[in-house]
């Protein structure tokens, strides 16, 4: 298993993984998200590649000088429970720490108790803050 930076040739496999993991939504075009990420801190978009060449995990990170964020953390069904999700988060956090990032945040959809439990196991806790959003560009 190798964790490396995303390559544009990975796009189809990554989108398929995100679909398998239930991360995609009709109002959020994953290919556009990838294109946008490649324009900003592309080195913070990471994939895990199995020995047979399959993309089996992803993590997309960003740092704005105040907080780090990790998005699109996905692990293939075949690799769940192996610690790969924790490895992807450790990799993302290491990259953010190298940039001087003091705190990392994740967003989890309400009711996704399995994923909330995963992050709590890694030491994350509710911030007592509510995320609000507004689209600037409709996909």
Image: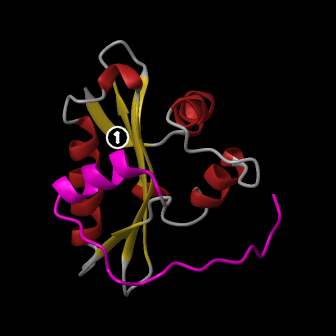
Q: Position of residue 87 (x, y in %)?
A: 21, 43
Q: Which residue is mark 1?
A: 4
Residue 137 lies in the magenta stretch: yes
Left or right, residue 138 beside residue 60: right
Residue depicted at 44% across the width and 51% down the height: 112
Q: Nearer the viewer, residue 106 or 37?
A: 106
In the rendered image, the quadrant that contains the N terminus is top left
Number of labels in the image equals 1
Look at the magenta stretch and give its main secondary structure: loop
Residue depicted at 27% across the width and 31% down the height: 2
- Few, some or many C-alpha atoms within 10 Å of disc 1 (few <14, some 14-19, many ≥20)? some
Q: Which residues are magenta?
A: 111-139
Q: Residue furthest right?
A: 138
Q: Nearer the viewer, residue 124 or 68?
A: 124
Q: Position of residue 25 (x, y in %)?
A: 68, 48
Q: Nearer the viewer, residue 95 or 93?
A: 93
Q: Position of residue 92 (x, y in %)?
A: 30, 57
Q: Position of residue 111 (x, y in %)?
A: 46, 55
Left or right, residue 83 beside residue 134: left
Q: Quadrant of residue 3?
A: top left
Q: Residue furthest top?
A: 52
């Amino acid at each position: 298993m190798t964790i490396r930076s995303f390559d544009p040739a990975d796009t189809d496999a990554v989108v398929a993984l995100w679909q398998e993991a239930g991360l995609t939504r009709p109002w959020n075009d994953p290919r556009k998200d990838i294109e946008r990420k490649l324009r900003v801190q592309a080195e913070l978009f990471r994939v895990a590649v199995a020995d047979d060449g399959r993309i089996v995990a992803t993590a997309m990170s960003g740092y704005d000088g105040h907080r780090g964020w990790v998005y699109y953390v996905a692990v293939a069904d075949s690799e769940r429970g192996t610690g790969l999700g924790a490895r992807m988060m450790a990799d993302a956090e290491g990259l953010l720490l190298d940039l001087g990032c003091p705190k990392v945040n994740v967003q989890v959809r309400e009711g996704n108790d399995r994923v909330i439990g995963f992050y709590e196991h890694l030491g994350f806790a509710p911030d007592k803050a509510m995320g609000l959003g507004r689209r600037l560009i409709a996909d």
